Amino acid sequence: MKFGQIENSEHIDFQLPADDPRTVEILKQNDTSKPMNVYVGCAKWNKTDLKNFYPRGTKDELTYYSRQFNSIELNATFYSMPSRDQVIAWRNKAPDGFCFFPKVTQSISHMRRLNDVQFLTDEYCDNISNFEVKLGMVFLQLHANFKYKNFDRLVTFVENFPKAIPLAVELRNTEWFNDKTISNEVYELFEKHQVTNMIVDTAGRRDLLHMRLTTPKAFIRYVGANNPHSDRDRLDDWINRLKIWVDQGLRDIYFFVHQNIELESPFLSAYFIERLNKEFGLNLQIPALLPATNPKEK
C-alpha cells in the first residue's frame, strides 16, 4: 500500500486524535446487549504479498487464508469488475463465518469518478451479492483529488446504492475534513443513508485521520510503517480507543491491517487479535504463524 508511505517514521506523532463529539451520539444508537461482531484480516491473500505466511505445499491460498482469519479486505475487486462466477468461486472456498469486504471497482471510483456509473454499480452489486451471507461490507475508496466540487456525484452514488448492501466510503482529500461546512454536509449524507465513514490510519497522512463515525460501526484500515516498535504501539492505542467506543455502545468492528511491505501483515494481525481477545473476552481464532519468519523474532 503506497498511500501514506514514508521512508522514516521515527519523527511521526502517532497519537490518535480526540473523538468527534458526534461519535458518542452515534454509538448510543446501538443495543449494548448485542454481542460483539469483530472481523480482523489482511488486504490480500496471495503468496507474493504474504511471503512465508503459507506453509510449504499450500495449494490454494484463499482456502488456507480463510481458515486462519475470519475476513479479508478484498482489494482484488478494485482492479477489475468481479464476475458472478468468480465471486461464487471465492465464496465456496471460504468456510462458514468468513466475510469478504470488497472494494468498489476502479472503473466506478477512479476512471469515471462516480460520473454516470449507475449501470456499472448495478453490475458490481449484482455480482458482489453472490457472496450472500459471506458479504461483510462494500467500500468505496475515492481518489485523493476527488473534492467537494464533485459532491453531487457522491450524493447520487450514495442515494442510488442498494440499501441491502452495507456501504462504507473512504475520502482521501483534506477538503472533506478541514472545512467544517463541507464535512458536516458529507457526514449528514452518510448518516441519513447509513453509510459508514471509513477511518484510515497511515504514517504519512495524519492530516486525514479522523475519529468521526457516521454509523455505529467502526471500519478501520490500519497501515503499519514496517517499524517493529511503533507498529505494535499503534495497535495498542487502537485497543484503548476501541475500549472507549465499546463502552459507549460499539459492537461492530472491522479492522484490516496493511503494510508497505505486506510480509508483516499476518503477524501484526495476529498480535491485534490476541489483544482483542484479551481485552474484550473474545474467542477470535489466532492465525497460525511460521515462527522462523515472524519479524518479532528476527
Image (cartoon, rainbow, N blue to C red):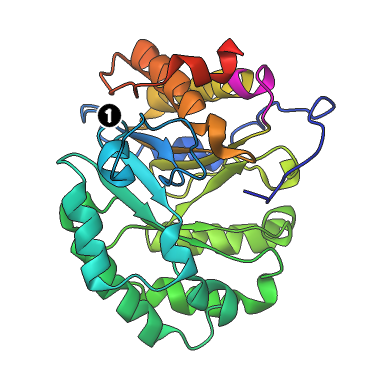
Q: Quarter holding the C terminus?
A: top right
Q: Is residue 107 above or below residue 75?
A: below
Residue lying at 73% horizontally and 61% vertically, measured from the top left: 175
**Which residue matches tag 1?**
36
* 35 with respect to 121 (left or right): left
Q: How many marks?
A: 1
Q: What range of the chain is rendered magenta?
A: 226-232
Residue lying at 45% horizontally and 14% vertically, measured from the top left: 291
Q: Is residue 247 above or below residue 118?
A: above
Q: Amino acid at mark 1?
A: Met
Of all residues, the one furthest to the right in this rendering is: 11
Quadrant of res 111: bottom right
Most foreground residue, 295 or 268: 295
Of all residues, the one furthest to the front in this rendering is: 57
SS of the residue under disc 1:
loop
- How many neighbours does mark 1 have within 10 angstroms: few (below 14), some (14-19), or many (20 or more)? some
Most foreground residue, 157 or 57: 57
Q: Is residue 285 above or below residue 7?
A: above
Residue lying at 69% horizontally and 77% vertically, measured from the top left: 149
* Residue 295 on the magenta segment: no
Most foreground residue, 15 or 61: 61
* 213 with respect to 63 (left or right): right
* Residue 231 on the magenta segment: yes
Q: Is residue 161 visible?
A: yes
Where is residue 76 drawn, in percent x and y? 43, 59
